[in-house]
Image (spheres, rainbow, N blue to C red):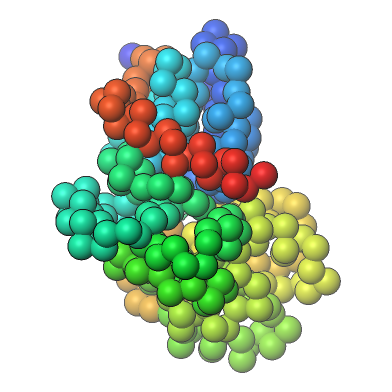
Amino acid sequence: GALPDDLFEAIGTLKKELNAVLLAHYYQDPDLQDIADYIGDSLELSRKAANTDADVIVFVGVHFMAETAKILNPDKLVLLPDLEAGCSLADSCPPDAFAEFKAAHPNHLVVSYINCSAEIKAMSDIICTSSNAVKIVNQIPKEQPIIFAPDRNLGRYVAEQTGRDLVLWQGSCIVHETFSERKIVQLKIEHPEAEVIAHPECEPSVLRHASYIGSTTALLKYSQASSNQTFIVATEPGIIHQMQKQAPGKRFIPAPPESNCACNECPFMRLNTLEKLYLAMKNRQPEITLPEEIQVAALRPIQRMLEMSV
Ligand code: 13P
Ligand code: SF4
């Protein structure tokens, strides 16, 4: 059928009918951020999902995020506007290969970044996000060997920050690996007053130019608190919508990709649209479902993360 003229209003009506909560990540299109009940980084969104009393969770983000919400709420309906909204980082760690990797490193504790599938979570001891990874690894006894999966860039950064020797799974995010060191240096010459701020999923060649490194929420907070007026932002540019909204007078320059043909937007995050969000709520699908044994096994490491990051 035809779509309603005012999608914002129609989504608002469906939200009441379903008693739904809309959780959105900062890498979503501005319209989707504006219509959400909560916007946040992966840790904040997991906390919201863990504590909501809504009947339906609509995840305006990618598959692993909606899956995490489902693991935390097995009896709730969890909707994702487009099931194709995956993640290159999660895909870079297939369960069979990871099971072999784990078997090759006995006695290691497995700390996995939340950007992974439910199957990987089920094989993990503790989940972390970019905002609590250092804090969590610091709580693990020094003599305990650790596997860190799947992001090698975040893993390398955490190893540096904690002084720990982590066994890294060699995964990465296509978005955070496109930023060009050469172009960032060029931008710094053009804007000597600008401060580079970066997400730890970026490569070391980019991170070494950053005066501040953190999760999306941490970057947002830092850019608001800093007395600086201009920032070169090395993460998915969706976050700039919030940075600009909260500090209209400041200037935020997205870090450019190496190739002019490449784009620094996450192709998975950007699959979601207002139309798909409306249709998902109207049709009560696509729904996230999980085999019970995976759901149960994946819950424990997520709960451990929530306990270790209060
Ligand atoms: P955070 O918002 O937790 O920093 O995660 C970034 C990211 O890449 C999500 O896919
Ligand atoms: Fe995955 Fe990277 Fe997209 Fe985040 S930005 S969802 S890590 S592909």
In which quarter of the view is residue 51 placed? top right
In which quarter of the view is residue 167 placed? bottom left
In the picture, measured across the screen, residue 80 lies left or right of residue 96, that is right
Let me know if residue 236 appears in the view.
yes
| Quadrant showing the N terminus | top left
Residue 164, position as x, y percentages in the image: 49, 73
In the picture, measured across the screen, residue 162 lies left or right of residue 153, that is right
Outermost residue toward the bottom in this view: 189
Observer-nearest of 250 and 120: 120
- Residue visible at 57% across and 73% down? 161
- Residue visible at 56% across and 71% down? 162
Residue 214, position as x, y percentages in the image: 60, 64
| Quadrant showing the C terminus | top right
Residue 28, position as x, y percentages in the image: 50, 45
- Residue visible at 66% across and 78% down? 211
Q: Is residue 295 above or below residue 33?
A: above
Observer-nearest of 70 and 128: 128
